[in-house]
Image: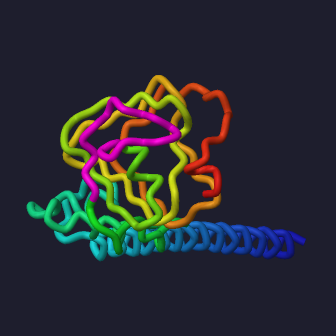
Amino acid sequence: MFTFNSFSFSTVHFLSSHLMFKFITESVFSLFIRILFSLICRSVFNASRRSLAYLSCRTGNPIDDCWRCDPNWETNRQRLADCAIGFGKNAIGGRKGRIYVVTDPANDDPVNPRPGTLRYAVTQEEPLWIIFKRDMVIRLKKELIITSFKTIDGRGSSVHITDGPCLKIHYATNIIIHGINIHDCKPGSGEPYSKTSNF
């Protein structure tokens, strides 16, 4: 009887030790797999960021890394269209069009926009890469309805669209907006205007 009890105790002790060892081994293995997976994901993410950049500034923003470190980025502004990631990465904006310079922040005639204004640029039928001559604050009278194949590129200037109706994309494709401060928007009257109602 004593021998049987001793044998049983030893067997139970062995089994519990074996199970504990197995549990620790599986926990360590699970932790190892999680760390390995994390390192692989980080490596893939960093590789994708590096592939976007002329040089890597390591700003934490892969789109900015794509262009900001190039000292001559202004001579090839349209390369920004190659920097997009995510859902809209295939949008080309106005890359196939000419560069249009906005010079007039004040005039905002929704029916007959004047050349030099942002509204005039975004309502043109041709592709355009729109930039700004200087810092400016634009206060719109009605929503700015943007037509297809336009890029609004605020890099190099401090551009604010504020204190009025803001931007609207309606039945349009291939639009890039980058480096523009859009804030304190207010609803417009909702009246359509002829030059943009079909877009």
Image spot of residue 135 (x, y percent): 22, 35
- Specify whether residue 84 is in view: no
Q: Which residue, as the protein is rendered here, is positioned at the far front?
A: 112
Relative placement, left or right, of 95 versus 143 is left
**Residue 183 forms part of the magenta stretch:** no
Q: Is residue 117 above or below residue 4?
A: above
Q: Main secondary structure of the magenta part?
A: loop
Q: Which residue is drawn at 57% across and 46% down?
A: 168
- Quadrant of image for the N terminus: bottom right
Q: Residue at x 9, y 61 (%)?
A: 71
Q: Residue at x 43, y 36 (%)?
A: 182
Q: Which residue, as the protein is rendered here, is positioned at the far right?
A: 1
Q: Which residue is drawn at 70% across and 71% down?
A: 19
Nearer to me, 67 or 45: 67
Which residues lie in the magenta part? 100-117
Report the label total. 0
Q: In this view, does 139 lie above or below 31?
A: above
- Quadrant of image for the C terminus: bottom right
Nearer to me, 73 or 190: 190
- Specify whether residue 50 is in view: yes
Image spot of residue 141 (x, y percent): 50, 29
Q: In this view, does 85 lie above or below 133?
A: below
**Residue 114 forms part of the magenta stretch:** yes
Image spot of residue 24 (x, y percent): 59, 67
Nearer to me, 81 or 83: 81
Q: Which residue, as the protein is rendered here, is positioned at the far left?
A: 71
Tell me the quarter of the picture where residue 66 sits.
bottom left
Q: In this view, does 116 lie above or below 39?
A: above
Relative placement, left or right, of 113 versus 98 is right
Q: Which colour scheme is used?
A: rainbow
